[in-house]
Image (tube, rainbow, N blue to C red):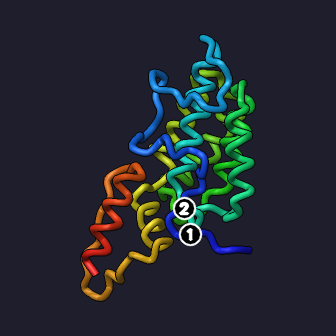
Amino acid sequence: GGHKPATQKKGISRSSSTGKHAPSASSPRARGKPHKGPSSEHVFSAASLLLDISDRLPYRSVRSASSKVWTKFDRSIRKCSTTRQVASQALWFVAQLKGEILRSTWQRKASLWVEQLTKCSHASCLHLVQQLESEAIDWNRVAEQWALERGLLTAVSEGGSAVVFHGPLSSEEEEEEAEKMAQLD
């Protein structure tokens, strides 16, 4: 397999989402999504958030580093029009996450989360995807993975100080953070 550029994200087709943390119902992604009606509002939001979460993870934090796999996931999630379809994509996505980016407290909740996801309603599906973002993924570890992927992390054991990240970063903030870390070397 070929080696991808260190700064390329898995979500190759969403350059318009830079600067956003999570899409809200009032600022939906327009491209490639089904028309929103009252009953599809939660489905749309859950699918958009799942896409956004996947976009913020580097390849080294997921099991498959194939851009074809993630392009297919992108297309599949954009076609979702039911909670069952979003739940199916969320289950696949969770299985892709490597253990080192998951919070230790998540392991106790994971099986219940999966069970709830398999029988979720419109509203609970969105809530469960939000839990994935806020309770499952350790965004400090994700930031470390980005730094490692970009070759910027200096060994803390050599007396360097660790940079602590508080929550998800937009790509603009990540670039600024990367520049700061590069200047520390």
Image position of 127 (left or right of 170): right
Tell me if residue 124 comes above or below residue 48 in the rendering: above
Q: Residue at x 46, y 60 (%)?
A: 142
Residue 32, quarter of the rendered image:
top right
SS class of the residue under badge 1?
loop
Whether residue 21 is visible here, answered yes or no, is yes
Q: Residue furthest top?
A: 38
CA neighbours of label 1 inside 10 A, class few (<14), some (14 to 19), many (20+): few
Residue at the image position 58 percent from the left and 22 percent from the top = 42
Q: Is residue 168 visible?
A: no
The location of residue 97, given as percent across then percent down, is 61, 57
Residue 119 image position (x, y, % from top left): 71, 29
Q: Quadrant of the C terminus?
A: bottom left
Disc 2, SS:
loop
| Residue lying farthest to the bottom in this orientation | 158
Is there CB contact under 8 Å for labels 2 and 1? Answer: yes
Residue at screen point 45% across, 77% down: 151
Q: Amino acid at mark 1?
A: Pro
* Residue that mark 2 sits on: 8
- The Cα atoms of the two marked residues, 2 and 1, are separated by 6 Å
- What residue is drawn where x is 39% and y is 43%? 19
Crowding at mark 2 (Cα within 10 Å: few <14, some 14-19, many 20+): few
Q: Could you tell me residue 129's position as x and y percent?
A: 56, 37
Q: Which residue carries the number 1 mark?
A: 5
Position of 152 relative to 145 (above/below)? below
Vertical comparison of 43 with 136: above or below: above
